[in-house]
Amino acid sequence: MSVNQGTRAYDAVIVGAGHNGLVAAAYLARAGRSVLVLERLGHTGGAAVSSTPFAGVEARLSRYSYLVSLLPRKIVADLGLDFRLRSRTISSYTPVERAGRPTGLLVGGGEARTRDAFARLTGGAREYAAWQRFYGMTGRVAERVFPTLTEPLPTRDELRRRVDDESAWRALFEEPIGAAVEEYFEDDLVRGVVLTDALIGTFADAHDPSLAQNRCFLYHVIGGGTGAWDVPVGGMGALTDALAAAARAAGAEIVTGHEAVRVTGDEYGAEVTYRTAEGEGVAAARHVLVNAAPQELATLTGDTPPEPAEGAQLKVNMLLTRLPKLRDPDVDPREAFAGTFHIAEGYGQLATAHAQAAAGRLPAAPPSEIYCHSLTDPTILGPELAGRGYQTLTLFGLHTPARLFDRDNDGVREELLAATLAELDAHLAEPLADCLATDADGRPCIEAKTPLDLERDLRLPGGNIFHRALSWPYSQAETGRWGVETPHPRVLLCGAGAVRGGGVSGVPGHNAAMAVLEQGA
């Protein structure tokens, strides 16, 4: 579908049909505004898509983003989305060798079972009691902070009063998260499991004075007011398909293959120049909402770009004929892989991996975490695959900054993938390679994406999955009322790089729409 060439006027033009752009489009269209969404790619969804990456294999994987925590139920309800999430019965499993034997920590399956798992690993009750105190604290913060994400930005003091817990505020907002982890916990493995939420897509040490790790940790523990990470039924593309359907049903016009190349505007309105296979066109609007990274926004408007972003993750998608057996005899693979399976993520291992990567080397023991979507939601597999017991695995690697791939992206990717899978194999009773399915051409069903691959495929600057470093969820000198404002009065940022952006949340899209509706005309 194509917009007629020449200049057309809308109430709002949205650049980018990722999930945040679609949320904004649906809200504005439902409010009676005329809306045009311009998408560069040939499909909607951005990084929140389902696709079949393996030739001739009927498995629709969440290829990039893959779990949901930060999406407010308010957005799902407001937009009447036909979209469901399913809880994971197991939170996590972390294998380790202690006293010469394979064991591990299984979190989930009920309080009594989790308490017993901590006791078996650590030899006492202390660590589980600390776990309850720590996550009781973060849970109370989540209940107070999460509802503010779809409200006008509070000031720092307002949010602090809302949290109403000075020790929690100090631990999460003022001191490096490593201090709290070390204060609460003694066991190295338990410390590492806790710290990982501070390092997803964020290259930082536990004691980094920038507190980038704290901001990452905060967003990972406040989702839904509980911190739970859920599985999207039908894959992540089910969400963006539902959003696109809601936007279109409300009257929004969505066109693919339309690349925005320039945004201009003044206090009265703005224009977007876009390019298609047929040539260039211009769409005028009272407001332009840019669902792209701040660097891309600066390119479109001609402004000075912000500091370059850098991603720091390896994403691996796999299809298996069966789940591999574990060396730990006390854990069923169907439970171990149902939650987050932590690999080489002890506290000391994470510190070592960060130091090695900061020195320009790949981590010798790359930390990563895995989960099996199809255990919770088998609908992503075709009936034949599901009937034969096939399963998916999604791996997310940490501490692999984009700079490590500059010299040879393809070669370093293969080296890192081999080292990462070797760390997993160390905890398996059989090699993962023996369990990999093959595609129609006989190739193993495995694909890996580095930060540079994400930059190329999705235009994520530096491959940063958050578009830039995550922000505190309160107002600062440069932020506006909703955290989506830009120096251009009729141009708003509605992507993950907005204040309170990052993750699959729809929050920046909601907030940009609210900012437009508040302005009236």
Image: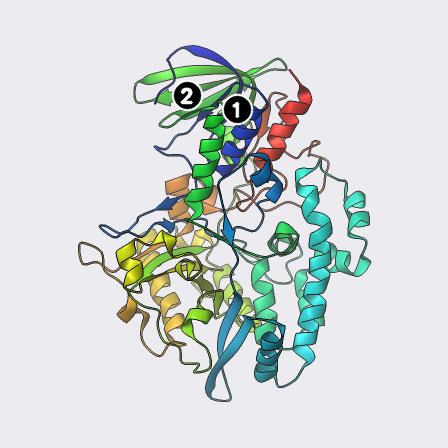
- Marks 2 and 1: in contact by CB < 8 Å? no
Task: Tell me the kind of residue under disc 2.
Answer: Tyr
What amino acid type is highlighted by mark number 1?
Thr
Q: Residue at x 27, y 64 (%)?
A: 388
Q: Which residue is mark 2?
A: 274
Please state if 255 lies on the left or on the right of 74 as rendered.
left
Q: Is residue 382 above or below residue 44?
A: below
- Could you tell me which quadrant the N terminus lies in? top left
Q: Quadrant of residue 306?
A: top right
Question: What's the distance in space between the residues labelled 1 and 2, CA to CA?
Answer: 13 Å
**Residue identified by numbered label 1:** 301
Q: Residues within 10 Å of mark 1 (few under 14, many from 20)?
A: some
- State left or right for residue 47 relative to residue 131: left
Q: Position of residue 518 (x, y in %)?
A: 68, 24
Q: Position of residue 290 (x, y in %)?
A: 52, 29
Q: The residue tagged with tag 2: helix, strand or loop?
A: strand
